[in-house]
Amino acid sequence: MEDKTYKDFGFKAPFRGLGGGTFRRRKYLLFLLLAFSVSFLYSQEKTSSVELTGYVSTLQSSMFNTLSGPFMNENILHNRLNFKIYPNERITFAAEFRNRLFTGDYVRLGSYYSDLIGDDTGVADMSWNIVSKNSFLLNTTADRLWVDLSFGNFQVTAGRQRINWGQTLVWNPNDIFNAYSFFDFDYVERPGSDAVRLQYFTSSSSSAELAVKVDSDNDVTAAGLYRFSRWGYDIQFLAGFSNGEDVVLGTGWSGALGDYSFRGEATWFDPYEDFPGGDGSLMVTAGFDRIFRNNSMAQVQFMYCTNPPDPGSFEAFYSTNLSARDLAFSEFSAFGQFTWAVTPLINLSFSTMWFPDLEGYFAGPAFDWSMAENIDLSVLWQHFDAVMGGERMKINIGFLRLKYSF
């Protein structure tokens, strides 16, 4: 039987260039180093508090269409290091790194895979393929590098950071700075942005924010958000400019309806060149979740999009370059998940999604076992069945992960 490649499993090579540093990016790094140095100069404490956390994990995965067909196998040895320094009560410095060693069939795809892993969409290129061979790939990425300054009710954060404006649990159209894929379960920290974020806390339950992000293509995302509490709900409104293309207007909420949590978001994307009335896209999502007495939790979420993009291949489901406008693969989408803590040490869960436009669905059971203090074992399966490019595609991906946290 002929060996299969990633294309036979519904994936395709990207068309745009990946990786590569520039003089502009080096200037950005120098700016960050200068900002960090200035923050220390303003420290009034004689001693600093230093914090180190992280984890080491090994993730084995196998992708296949059927059990009788070929398998694509991969192992990722992953070490994460999170450094935080507190020169005084007003200043925090953070640097966080992903160190990953890849082995298996994907590495043998050559530059397509190594460039994909080494790609950095930030204005600063802080992802390095240390060693790239036919049998293994070693990559180091700094996905957090920021300094935070607080003065009374005012807070400013500069550098690579996560700006989380989402309110819902699966799809976040309000998360215009750093959207993420639900299926990338191993990246619990989620992507960050090269940005400056200003926050002003008008009260204990309300705040105003302004954030500006620049990416590797010099595209700017700039927006303001106002968040407040009313009628037992946390409510927010946002407006701005996304990815150098769209004017965005949005709102989000989270609260309770009886025994159920009720969360939702809505965002309008409209190309600024034709604003208003261009080829816009409205994304609305809402969901309910509830914790039950038997240590179980259930959630459902629905999403509607007036102009969903064509995913083209299963690669889009795992893309690390998703924008908030790209979250929908179908005009209507639905999600459901049930999680049960069988014992204090064992969790079982099952997730599913429905994509009517693709005549497809996703199903994913998971098993998590806390084997010892700071040691966890996880077994997951992800199954996709959908029509893409006029052809029905089925993919199964099995995962086995052992993780030690410190």
Image: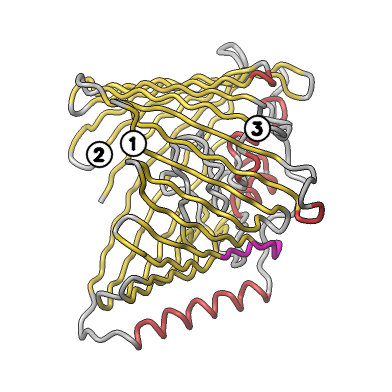
Tell me if 366 is positioned left or right of 63 in this view: left
Most foreground residue, 157 or 96: 157
In the image, what residue type sits under mark 2?
A: Ile
Whether 225 is among the magenta residues is no
In the rendered image, which residue does mark 3 sit on?
305
Colour mapping: secondary structure
Most foreground residue, 128 or 325: 325
In the image, what residue type sits under mark 3?
A: Cys
Magenta segment range? Answer: 212-220
Q: Residue at x 43, y 44 (%)?
A: 77
Most foreground residue, 298 or 376: 298
**Alpha carbon of mark 1 to alpha carbon of mark 3: how far?**
38 Å
Q: Position of residue 226 (x, y in %)?
A: 47, 57
Tell me if 180 is positioned left or right of 47 in this view: right
**Alpha carbon of mark 2 to alpha carbon of mark 1: how far?**
7 Å
Asked if the residue under mark 1 is in contact with the one under mark 2, i.e. CB atoms within 8 Å, the reply is yes
Tag shown at residue 303: none
Of label 2 and label 3, which has the lower sequence position?
3
